[in-house]
Amino acid sequence: MIEIQRNFYLKGLNTFGLDVFASHYVCIRKQEDLSELLESDAFGEFKHQILGLGSNVLFINDYFEGLVIHICIPGISVVENGPERVIVEVGAGENWSDFVDKMVENGLGGIENLALIPGTVGAAPLQNIGAYGVEFKDNFVSLKAFDLQTGKTVSFGPEECEFGYRNSIFKTSHPNRFIILSVRLKLSRKHQLKTDYGDIKKHLSEEGNTHPGISDISRIIKKIRQSKLPDPSKIGNAGSFFKNPILHPLVFEGLRREFPDIVSYPDENGFFKVSAAWLIEQAGWKGKRIGNVGMHEKQALVLVNHGGATGGELHQFAMNVQYSVKQKFGILLEPEVNILS
Ligand code: EPU
């Protein structure tokens, strides 16, 4: 039986730590709960918003007039157990970071670079989470989703998800239509470590570690993340607030002539991914604080609630940052966080 609650306090369900209420709330523990939800009066009467742990959302109002569908579906099981490869199926409500730790403890590799990313497993494909040279899509096999339009369960393979940089069809073409129930990932018993990104190699050599394993990599990544990114349980934030803009080579070259120090990386399509953190820092916003809102002092891309900020204040601050980067560089930063009103 599902229970639709009214005036539900969402402070624990948004990592900005905002004092927000939803007019209606329901927790979904299994697929059958969704069929029940479709038949309820509350569904259809209000707009709805699917939430995992709320680690990539910004509610801009104190009151969300609508139904929050909180995905709490548990479960981790092995569906294929080979000598080199294991396929696991994970419930959408599982905590991503705990799941990565469990896999690493069991010697299963492929997602160790994605350690400590806040959020649920079900939210991971939505924006194709990525960090330190690995993206969610790299280990993805398939997912099962409930279609709120038809009431049917559908399977999606890699192609159908249309994964891109912090993107998928669940975010762009069909937001709030499909509820991800479970995800299948392929993990390795024989590992190919990804150590090219940033400081991973530096940490390994400082440790004198010449034969690292997946647990070394996840430990180092956690250390790097903890040194740069604020812990949402202490300072409200949703990780990177904006995406790194991807520029056409001609646009990029023009910009590089004017700003020779610009931090960028060529991508696989011949375009250039520019560091949004660098742009924000150069525009003077790194570590800047106005009232209870600021950009983090160690990572300029992270918008933070120093305590007591409203969603409206956070949003206004982010728009001011966006405006000044546009003025200085002519680049319009696109929010990575889902802005909900
Ligand atoms: N930099 C600055 N100023 C800063 C921070 C960084 O100039 O304040 C420059 C540095 O030169 C640095 C470069 O930007 O070398 C890249 O910084 P970083 O490695 O921190 O990565 P990022 O591009 O800012 C992305 C993801 C993060 C992910 C890291 C590591 C996006 C929007 N963000 O950040 O993901 O953890 O790479 O892979 O792609 C998230 O999505 O919420 C998130 C935290």
Image (tube, rainbow, N blue to C red):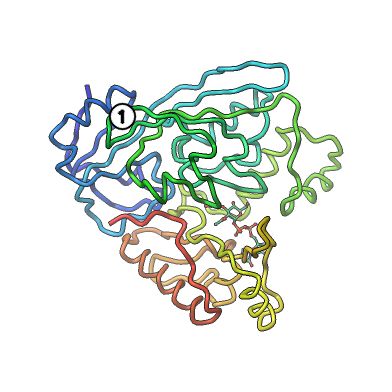
Instruction: Looking at the picture, tell me which residue is in the foreground, 124 or 149.
Output: 149
Q: Quadrant of residue 102?
A: top right
Q: Residues within 10 Å of mark 1 (few under 14, many from 20)?
A: many
Q: Secondary structure at mark 1?
A: strand
Position of residue 277 relative to residue 115, above or below, is: below
Closer to us: 310 or 40: 40
- Identified by mark 1, the residue type is Ile
The image position of residue 30, as x and y in percent, is: 34, 23
Whether 232 is drawn above or below 115: the answer is below
Residue at the image position 13 percent from the left and 34 percent from the top: 41
Going 79% across and 51% down the picture, which residue do you hit? 202
- Quadrant of ligand 1: it is bottom right
Q: Is residue 327 above or below residue 156?
A: below
Instruction: Please give left or right for residue 43 compared with residue 150 in the image.
Output: left
Left or right of 120 on screen, residue 314: left
Residue drawn at 20 percent across, 28 percent down:
3
- Between 66 and 14, the one lying in front of the other is 66
For label 1, the residue is 28
Image coordinates of residue 237 in percent, x first then y, are 45, 54
Task: Please give left or right for residue 272 compared with residue 291 in the image.
Answer: right
Quadrant of the drawing holding the N terminus: top left
